[in-house]
Image (tube, grey):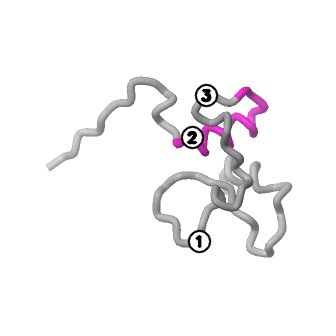
Amino acid sequence: MTEKRKQPGSKAGLFHPVEHAILADYLGKARPACARDIDPYAKEELQPDNDQSGVVRLRIGQDGYGEEFMLRNSVTPG
């Protein structure tokens, strides 16, 4: 049985609020209302090692450093 996916009413529904914050910051654009109060660098917003949610979040590099690259690495492939 094929599951039909619900189409979001707008493009805003395609991303989690933290993803909106990351993309807006990366692109140098104003954040949408749903992401204005989010700090993607806050400890509680960082990607945990065992996360299975599928939400793209910032992640500290394996060496424990790299905050300057966290934003770019979360948006660009590979």
Closer-to-camera residue (1/18): 18
Predominant SS of the magenta segment: helix
Amino acid type assigned to the residue bearing label 3 in the image: Ala
Residue 12: image location, x then y, percent: 51, 29
Image vertical order of residue 35 relative to residue 47, above or below: above
Res 76 visible: no
Residue at image coords 67%, 38%:
37
Assess disc 2: are there few (<14), some (14-19) or many (≥20) residues with their C-alpha within 10 Å of its C-alpha: many
Q: Is residue 46 left or right of residue 34?
A: right
Amino acid type assigned to the residue bearing label 2 in the image: Pro
Bounds of the magenta segment = 16-30
The mark that comes first in sequence, 3 or 1, is 3
Residue at image coords 76%, 56%:
70
Image vertical order of residue 75 relative to residue 36, above or below: below
Assess disc 3: are there few (<14), some (14-19) or many (≥20) residues with their C-alpha within 10 Å of its C-alpha: few
> Element at badge 3?
helix
Q: Which residue is mark 3?
A: 33
Q: Which residue is mark 2?
A: 17
Assess disc 1: are there few (<14), some (14-19) or many (≥20) residues with their C-alpha within 10 Å of its C-alpha: few
The mark that comes first in sequence, 2 or 3, is 2
